[in-house]
Image (spheres, rainbow, N blue to C red):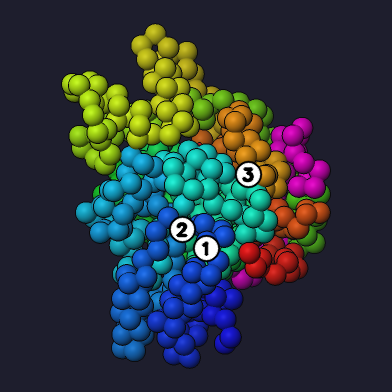
């Protein structure tokens, strides 16, 4: 094999199992590719060469002794919001620039047990707040398909690294679209599981009632492979569902005819770019040709989703981020007069502008006298949004629509207009508010060769049907352009 980084996770896994290649060779190939390509893409915050090679050697030992699984020796990148013991976890923030977690997140523990290899930590919007990765305190990440454009966010590093082939697959987190939107912009597959499906223990909290960890991969099979590895009940996360991982990879094949695909009118409204609409409509035709039955569904409260999210998410964030006070974690201002001054200076200097904006919105929304008008109201609307989905799933098995209203925009294009930035999540946010699973699978390109994602959404804990429809779609869709060479 001339370039090991061209293989998918499933292909890599097969060659490793047959011992035609070694985990060390694979890790070395990816580390070389990172050296060559990442200075342009800047998907990584930290690369752990030594750790990766040590893990690869351990994987080779397991492969040699017959104790290997499908992920043994797979070189994976991790969004820098997930704790790996002994490895800096910055969350894209100055506040945590020097934070080294003393424990592993549950997903990390699971991946370690599976024998995966960690290449490094991937860039993100600070504390996962953003849609372009421009809010990272360290540097932006560039879209491998066009380096003048954003990769999406907040898991922009996770999506860009998969597309640039600087890791075989990655983990991201999704609070309002942060896995699906960058997956769509970078032409990779990204999945937000059902809320509670994947443990959040060791995930730095943004908005705890919305956050979920999920995979970003080159194709749907790889996504199913990672899902199998990271799902499952975890007593360390009180919101973890009592559901064990399912054999998602074995339910991918098989016909999808008769599956009902709901098309929400509200997702094809004003603001959706023509080219995205065309690609998504072609995808719907493909689903029909596969034998799916297309039905119209209504999600009438969609129009309130962004406003609702921008009360609930900042409210929870303002509470979660109160722990960064210069005492318990991370950064502390150098000079101050008294305790109050220390708090103020630490938080003013340690957080970036968007994080401070969210803390102010959230604190305001929760303050006495405003709680009923904002937080309570938003929670009520959230219930209506959830009911929209439950009603729709009485008529269909899967909902299909766009992931984002446009393809990847230019760096800087929306940086000074938070509202425009917030609107890029208009189709992904309702899925988090409801807690149902959603997936982005590439469905075409626009005239500039920029990828477009198709969003598929299913009922609670029906990731199996989501992956099956996506897998069948991917095979019928025909090839996407070759991976970019940034
Ligand atoms: N872009 C959204 C926000 O800034 C979603 C982020 C996310 O899913 N983490 O809140």
Q: Position of residue 3 (x, y in %)?
A: 57, 81
Disc 1 crowd, CA 10 A, few/some/many (<14, 14-19, 20+): many
**In 3D space, how far apart are the residues under numbered discs 2 and 3 (Cα atoms)?**
18 Å
What residue is shown with label 2?
A: 44
Marked residue nearer the N-terminal end (2 or 3): 2
Q: Is residue 458 magenta?
A: no
Tell which circle, 1 or 3, labels the residue nearer the N-terminal end.
1
Residue drawn where x is 66% and y is 38% of the image: 413
Q: Is mark 2 within 8 Å of ligand 1?
A: no
Q: Which residues are magenta?
A: 251-277
Q: Are marks 2 and 3 in contact (CB under 8 Å)?
A: no
Is residue 177 visible to us here? no
Residues tagged 1 and 3 counted as in contact (Cβ below 8 A): no
Horizontal arrangement in the rendering, residue 27 relative to residue 292 (left or right): left
Q: Decide which of 40, 204 is in the foreground and name it.
A: 40
Identify residue for label 1: 38
């Amino acid at each position: 094999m001339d370039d090991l980084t061209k293989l998918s996770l499933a292909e890599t896994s097969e060659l490793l199992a047959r011992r035609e290649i070694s985990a060390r060779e694979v890790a070395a190939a990816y580390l070389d590719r990172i050296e060559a390509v990442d200075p342009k893409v800047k998907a990584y915050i930290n690369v752990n060469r030594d750790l990766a090679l040590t893990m690869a050697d351990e994987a080779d030992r397991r492969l040699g002794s017959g104790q290997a699984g499908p992920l043994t020796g797979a070189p994976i990148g991790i969004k820098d919001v997930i704790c790996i013991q002994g490895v800096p976890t910055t969350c894209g923030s100055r506040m945590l620039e020097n934070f080294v977690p003393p424990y592993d997140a549950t997903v990390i523990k699971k991946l370690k047990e599976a024998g995966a290899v960690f290449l490094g930590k991937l860039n993100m919007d600070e504390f996962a707040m953003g849609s372009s990765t421009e809010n990272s305190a360290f540097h932006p990440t560039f879209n491998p398909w066009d380096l003048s454009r954003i990769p999406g966010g907040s898991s922009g590093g996770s999506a860009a690294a998969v597309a640039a082939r600087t890791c075989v697959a990655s983990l991201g987190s999704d609070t309002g679209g942060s896995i699906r939107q960058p997956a769509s912009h970078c032409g990779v597959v990204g999945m937000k599981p059902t809320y509670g499906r994947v443990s959040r223990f060791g995930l730095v909290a943004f908005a705890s009632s919305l956050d979920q960890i999920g995979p970003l991969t080159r194709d749907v099979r790889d996504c199913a492979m990672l899902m199998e590895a990271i799902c499952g009940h975890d007593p360390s996360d009180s919101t973890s569902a009592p559901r064990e991982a399912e054999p998602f990879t074995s339910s991918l094949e098989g016909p999808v005819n008769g599956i009902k695909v709901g098309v929400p009118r509200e997702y094809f409204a004003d603001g959706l770019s023509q080219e995205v609409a065309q690609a998504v409509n072609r995808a719907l035709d493909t689903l029909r040709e596969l034998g799916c039955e297309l039905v119209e569904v209504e999600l009438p409260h969609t129009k309130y989703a962004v406003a609702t999210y921008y009360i609930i998410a900042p409210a929870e964030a303002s509470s979660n981020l109160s722990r960064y006070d210069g005492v318990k974690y991370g950064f502390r201002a150098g000079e101050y007069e008294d305790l109050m001054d220390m708090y103020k200076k630490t938080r003013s200097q340690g957080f970036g502008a968007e994080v401070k904006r969210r803390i102010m919105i959230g604190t305001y929304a929760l303050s006495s006298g405003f709680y009923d008008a904002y937080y309570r109201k938003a929670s009520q609307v959230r219930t209506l949004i959830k009911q929209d989905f439950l009603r729709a799933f009485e008529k269909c098995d899967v909902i299909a629509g766009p992931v984002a209203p446009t393809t990847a925009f230019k760096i800087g294009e929306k940086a000074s207009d938070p509202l425009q930035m917030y609107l890029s999540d208009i189709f992904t946010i309702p899925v988090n508010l409801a807690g149902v699973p959603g997936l982005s699978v590439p469905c075409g390109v626009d005239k500039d060769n920029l990828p477009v994602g198709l969003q598929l959404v299913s009922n609670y804990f029906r990731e199996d049907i989501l992956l099956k429809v996506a897998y069948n779609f991917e095979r019928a869709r025909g090839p996407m352009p070759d991976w970019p060479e940034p």
